[in-house]
Image (cartoon, helix red, strand yellow):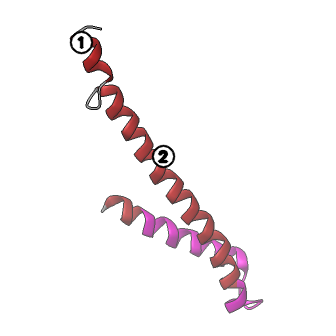
Amino acid sequence: MTQNQRESFGPGSAATRKKQTLLKCLKITLIYYIIGCLWIVFTDLLARRLFGERFDMGEVSVLKGLFYVTVTAGIIYA
């Protein structure tokens, strides 16, 4: 194996860095997905418990969604 071939697959190689970057992106995506799903489920339950029949749940869901998008956009920006 030549020096160039060893450098192409070593711990500091571009291929290794790319793989590590992809794994970090996957981890962030999965965390966002799990938190998003939990947000939807638990805030729907909470909204029904708090507001019951007093408000249109469609409107409450829109407000919840806008709040979620605003908060996550701020987190992504930071």
Measuring from the top left, give residue 27's x and y in whole percent.
47, 51
What's the CA distance linking mark 2 and mark 1? 30 Å
Residue at the image point whose x is 29% and y is 31% from the top: 11
Residue at the image point whose x is 45% and y is 53% from the top: 28
Q: Which mark is residue 4?
A: 1
**Of 16 and 1, which appears nearest the observer?**
1
Give the residue at the far left of this rendering. 3
Q: How many marks?
A: 2
Find disc 2 in the rendering and name its residue.
26
Q: Amino acid at mark 1?
A: Asn
Q: Is residue 72 above or below residue 49?
A: above
Residue at the image point whose x is 73% and y is 91% from the top: 54
Q: Is residue 8 left or right of residue 44?
A: left
Q: Main secondary structure of the magenta part?
A: helix
Q: Which residues are magenta?
A: 48-72
Q: Amino acid at mark 2?
A: Leu
Looking at the rendering, which quadrant does residue 16 occupy?
A: top left
Q: Is residue 24 above or below residue 66?
A: above
Looking at the rendering, which quadrant does residue 52 occupy?
A: bottom right
Image quarter in which the N terminus is found: top left
| Mark 2 / mark 1, whichever is N-terminal | 1
